[in-house]
Image: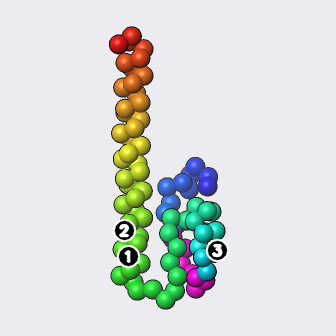
């Protein structure tokens, strides 16, 4: 994915339910794979889960980068 599209969530909606297709979609970067028929409530929940997961990853990245920054300061100060 190009850097400009990295934050776009992708959920594949398809009538193809074979496991190979699902695995291929996930390997190519899809966040989830939903086969038809599906209930709208189920799709909405999966969308919510994908967005939550992306938010948690962003938050974790901030925490890790902050921790790394603190470690660098400590190692440079000789402590």
Image vertical order of residue 39 relative to residue 76, above or below? below
Q: Helix, strand or loop at disc 2?
A: helix
- Closer to the observer: label 3 or label 1? 3
| Residue assigned mark 1 | 44
Residue that protrudes farthest toward the bottom in the picture:
37
**Label 2 environment density (alpha carbons within 10 Å; few <14, some 14–19, many ≥20):** few
Classify residue 71 by image quadrant: top left
Figure quadrant of the N terminus: bottom right
Tell me the CA gap for discs 3 and 2. 25 Å
Tell me the CA gap for discs 3 and 1. 24 Å
Residue 53 picture location, percent across and down: 40, 59
Q: Which is nearer the N-term, disc 3 or disc 1?
A: 3
Rendered residue at 38%/55% (across/down):
55
Classify residue 14 by image quadrant: bottom right
Q: Quick check: is 56 in the magenta stretch?
A: no
Q: Quick check: is 13 in the magenta stretch?
A: yes
| Residue assigned mark 3 | 20
| Residue assigned mark 2 | 48
Image vertical order of residue 71 relative to residue 16, above or below? above
């Amino acid at each position: 994915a190009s850097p400009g599209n990295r934050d776009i969530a992708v959920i594949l909606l398809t009538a193809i339910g074979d496991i190979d297709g699902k695995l291929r979609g996930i390997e190519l970067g899809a966040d989830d794979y939903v086969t038809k028929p599906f209930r709208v409530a189920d799709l909405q929940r999966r969308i919510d889960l994908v967005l939550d997961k992306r938010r948690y990853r962003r938050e974790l990245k901030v925490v890790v980068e902050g921790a790394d920054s603190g470690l660098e300061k400590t190692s440079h100060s000789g402590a």
